Image (cartoon, rainbow, N blue to C red):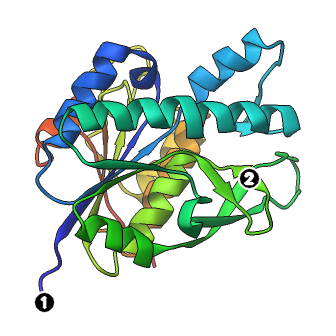
Amino acid sequence: MVKQQLHIVKIGGNIINDEGALFSFLKDFSELDSPKILVHGGGKRATEIAEAMGLKPKMIAGRRVTDEATLEVVTMVYAGLLNKKITAQLQKLNCYALGLSGADANCIVAHKRIVAAVDYGFAGDVDTINSEFIQVILQNNITPVFCAITHDKNGQLLNTNADTIASEIAIAMSNSYEVVLNYIFELKGVLEDIKDENSVIQHINLEKYEQLIESGIITEGMVPKLHNCFNALKKGVQKVNIGDASLIKNTNNLFTSLTIDNFS
């Protein structure tokens, strides 16, 4: 039996902060014919609001350290302001969307990250995805819109990396669909030279990825992003694409294609 294609799209970066760019992306996203899921971040907006409230965000290796005050801010921004703004725009575009956090319908259960070298506070690592509920939504022509808030099933909300959420949802849904995972941000793809927006690396495998990290070309937030890409491919996701918003206009015209050639 041929599986139906499912596009899972994670959007972040400056696109979310630019109303024109966001609406343009959402218009293209709403026109995708196949079932689709949107996952959004919003770290830059959360940082702006936190700083306006007198809080100084702390980042380590591209990941946010979440204390109690920061958790309140990111929950307000991710699950409230941004999630509802995005779903409202999708309704305007005749895309029947449902805004969700991981706590809604027990969609994403996570645990507080175990303290090792770094204490990330109330940061969550994903344990399970309620793929059955998500599939019911999709079968009813509803587009889920997930923010980056999960829960531990004991009443505790957790801040979870949106790239990881997209990857874990993609893995869970790959049992029922042919999943294409798309990471959309302001750059055209993974760049050889961060100062040259056209220096897109067209193809990355695991060996190339390790070389790029060792050489310092891939750093900070791109490291966990690519780790999630390879993890998804290893666990059943059909394809992963990374690029700017134009990637959604033609999902066959890809800037970056990641492979699992070097997995053993």
Q: Residue at x 86, y 39 (%)?
A: 68
Which SS class for mark 2? strand
Q: Tell me residue 192's x, y (percent).
A: 39, 29
Q: Residue at x 88, y 51 (%)?
A: 117
Q: Is residue 232 above or below residue 244?
A: below
Q: Which labelled disc corresponds to residue 73? A: none
- Residue 105 showing in the rendered view: yes
For badge 2, the amino acid type reads Leu
Q: Is residue 138 left or right of residue 134?
A: left
20 or 1, which is in the foreground? 20
Pointers 1 and 2 in contact (C-beta within 8 Å): no
Q: Is residue 27 left or right of residue 56?
A: left
For badge 1, the amino acid type reads Met
Query: What residue did someone put label 2 on?
Result: 157
Quadrant holding the N terminus: bottom left
115 or 169, which is in the foreground? 169
Q: Tell me residue 217's x, y (percent).
A: 51, 32
Q: Residues within 10 Å of mark 2 (few under 14, many from 20)?
A: many
Q: Point out the tag, 1 or 2, that comes first from the N-terminus.
A: 1
Q: Residue at x 68, y 64 (%)?
A: 110
Q: Tell me residue 156's x, y (percent).
A: 79, 57
Query: What residue did someone put label 1 on?
Result: 1
Q: Residue at x 79, y 61 (%)?
A: 155
Q: Residues within 10 Å of mark 1 (few under 14, many from 20)?
A: few
Whole-number angstrom distance, CA of label 1 to CA of label 2: 39 Å
176 or 30, which is in the foreground? 30
Q: Tell me residue 162's x, y (percent).
A: 54, 46
Which SS class for mark 1? loop
Closer to the eye: label 1 or 2 = 2
- Residue 170 picture quarter: bottom left
- Residue 256 picture quarter: top left
- Residue 190 showing in the rendered view: no
